[in-house]
Image: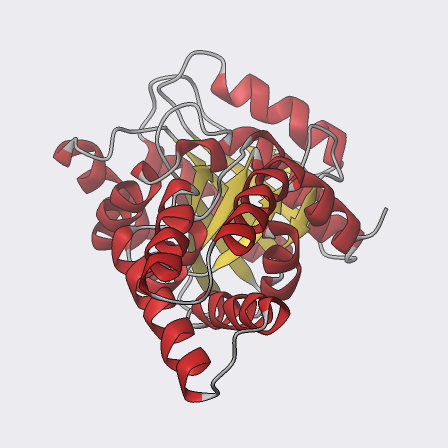
Amino acid sequence: MGFFGKIFDALKKTKESVSSKMRLLFSKNKLGDEFYDELEEILISSDVSVVTAEDVVEQVKEEAIGNKVRDEQFVTDLLKDILEDKLNEAEIPEFSYPCVIMFVGVNGVGKTTTIGKVANYFVKMGKSVTVAAADTFRAAASDQLSVWADRAKVRIVKHEEGSDPSAVIFDAVASAKARGTDVLLVDTAGRLHVKENLMNELKKMDRVVEREFPQAQFLKLLVLDATTGQNALSQARVFDEAVDLDGIVLTKLDGTAKGGFVFSLCGELHVPVVFAGVGEKMDDLVPFDSEQFVEGFF
């Protein structure tokens, strides 16, 4: 199954939910104030933020009225185009090498598993990869990452449990530079986005990479559980303030019946989705594509 098939299939729950509501809306309402109010409610119920939903519906309304259109297909296509534009407001970074990618996020979103899948993605692209086990707090975190590194057939740099995470990154960067490694993937401890001391620790790790490997492209990706819903927005805001996020990795996209918060992430925060996790297998992580996501959403 290709990338399109995987994203489309992962969004099956979302598509069933939204499409049924849209069919009902068109069957009972002509285009008018009541129609647009209900359209806004449908978007919000799919975890699109109120701000984004209002903006999208206003654009649909203006375009439809301006073209004097009342056709269901036209309005649906128009809605898709506007939502795709929202996703494209945040440009996905192009990878250049050497590259350091630091993965951040709250506990339980699947960072370690995601790093294993991203490592596999780059290996399949013919790149040399090293992973750094900078989550030194969670029991057996480095052991779990070692399993994924072994599956992806990549090197791992790790210290003892309880070590300074910045020291792990320092050593991993030195190793990557010495070996001419293309991609260094950094695992970090899960942290509550409301804990200032933990966020400051991330800033310290950020500074180590900037200082020790200035010639590398340095990306900070937030790993988000797609089933989180609109709380994902508040998480993203705090992490963005702490480390200036370059992108998002969505996990468990196949487990949500909503997923509309993605439009708000890109439209309001201007942070792009780079990868999407669409299942449990090693290859079930795909580059994000805005057109495919919108087609899968409706």
Q: Residue at x 73, y 42 (%)?
A: 9
Along the line of sight, the residue nearer the viewer: 125 or 216 = 125
**Number of disc labels:** 0
Say how the picture is coloured. Answer: secondary structure
Q: Position of residue 78 (x, y in %)?
A: 53, 73
Q: Residue at x 29, y 61 (%)?
A: 54
Along the line of sight, the residue nearer the viewer: 243 or 82 = 82
Name the image quarter holding residue 164.
top left
Q: Position of residue 18 (x, y in %)?
A: 54, 45
In this view, the residue farthest toward the right is 1
Asked whether residue 279 appears in the rendered view, the answer is: yes
Along the line of sight, the residue nearer the viewer: 101 or 210 = 101
Name the image quarter holding residue 61.
bottom left
Residue 273 sits above or below residue 97 on the image: above
Horizontal relation, residue 190 to residue 76: left or right: left
Q: Position of residue 234 (x, y in %)?
A: 25, 43
Horizontal relation, residue 266 to residue 140: left or right: left
Along the line of sight, the residue nearer the viewer: 217 or 9 = 9
Q: Residue at x 83, y 52 (%)?
A: 2
In this view, the residue farthest toward the left is 196
Asked whether residue 93 appears in the rendered view, the answer is: no
Q: Position of residue 201 (x, y in %)?
A: 23, 38
Residue 123 sits above or below residue 55 on the image: above
